[in-house]
Amino acid sequence: MIIRFQSSSSSSSIDLNSMTQSLNSSLLRRAILYVPGNDQRKIDKAIKSFDKIDSIVLDCEDGVAVKSKDDARKTILKILNQHGSNELLWKKLSVRINSMDSGIAVEDLAIIFSGKIIPRTILLPKVDTKSNIDEFFEYFQKAKINKNIIKHPIDLITYVESATGLLDLRDIAKHTIDMCKSLNDTININFAGIVFGSDDFCANIGATRSDDGKEVLMARQHVILVCKSLNLQAIDSVYINFRDIDGLKRQSEDGASMGFTGKQAIHPDQISVIQEAYRPSDNKIDWAKGLIDEFEQAQNAGRGAFVYHGQMIDMPLLKQAYNVMNIAKQIGKA
């Protein structure tokens, strides 16, 4: 359905079907929980609670010692083969491989993609240049993936963790989108989002971490702008002090208000706090539902602009309402 939306200042077209489809193209990732890929006990614990976690990241990178990398790969492969038949769980299983510059990412891809079940999402850390993306796709295509087992597009999420990566972020992201499209005739891979790695970023620029986070404010805003301009998820930094629940709550709510769509977690106790911060309130859901209903009534009556709750409604507010309802639907609140 393409309609002409008349606001108080301009007239423009909007394809409501296209908008809804694009909002549904990515999985919900309010919180992504890292679990060391070689720690069977922690993996089992996360899987047992998978219905309460948006995304479980089986980690091959920072959470695993160098000598345990191979154990992590084999454990992740076993987990995917054991649990991949449960589609509700499988959709939440992601794998973070090592960076391209590490020299061992090729081993991660070769082993993890050799099984009968492949990950729903791949996370690629420390992307500083377009050549990192080119190298990833070179290795990815060499992995012996059984294309017959791919039921959904594989989501790719990248990390920005350096000054170079941040300054070139939009060019790198656009290049990643182009590379994904170039493979769609063979393997359907979708660029889904960008993670801001604040600790590596601060180390890279020589910044000292502070409680108010002023040293990363500009970087966080830039990540959001790039993601929003390309319809990507924007995932905020880790809150390191996992015992400080009040601090986590403040930072999560701050990130949500800035425009991030989710946040990284390093401990199970952080999950509920983060996901609550990124959940639309009941009042917000009621507002969005009412606005969409009013909009549809106005369209059926042949009216253009209309007033809802004292506001003249324009396209940005309509898109915001659809965003809210999309999240509400995914968390069972619609």
Image (cartoon, rainbow, N blue to C red):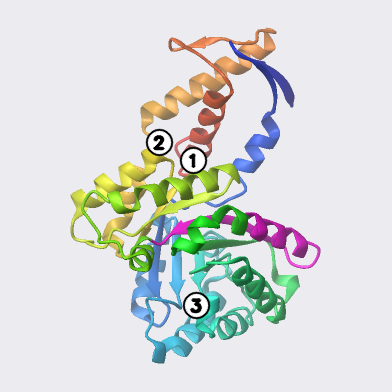
Q: Residue furthest bottom?
A: 67
Tell whether 5 sits left or right of 62: right
Q: Which mark is residue 280?
A: 2
Identify which amino acid the numbered label 2 is placed on. Answer: Pro
Please indicate, yes or no, whether residue 37 appears anywhere in the rendered image. Answer: yes
On the image, which quarter does residue 231 sit in? Answer: top right
Marks 2 and 1: in contact by CB < 8 Å? Answer: yes
124 relative to 115, above or below: above
Name which residue lies at 74% across and 25% down.
Answer: 2
On the image, which quarter does residue 173 sit in? Answer: bottom right
Tell whether 39 sits left or right of 156: left
190 relative to 330, above or below: below
Say whether disc 1 or disc 2 marks the residue closer to the N-terminus.
Answer: 2
Q: Which mark is residue 47?
A: none
**Which one is closest to the eye, mark 3 or mark 2?**
3
Q: Residue 327 carries which label?
A: 1
Secondary element type, mark 2: loop
Q: How crowded is mark 3: few (under 14 residues within 10 Å), some or many (20 or more)?
A: many
Q: Residues within 10 Å of mark 1 (few under 14, many from 20)?
A: many
Please indicate, yes or no, whether residue 152 appears anywhere in the rendered image. Answer: no
Tell whether 100 sits left or right of 138: left
**Residues drawn in magenta:** 174-197
Identify which amino acid the numbered label 3 is placed on. Answer: Asn
125 relative to 191, above or below: below
Distance (Cα) linking label 3 and label 1: 31 Å
Q: Quadrant of the N terminus?
A: top right
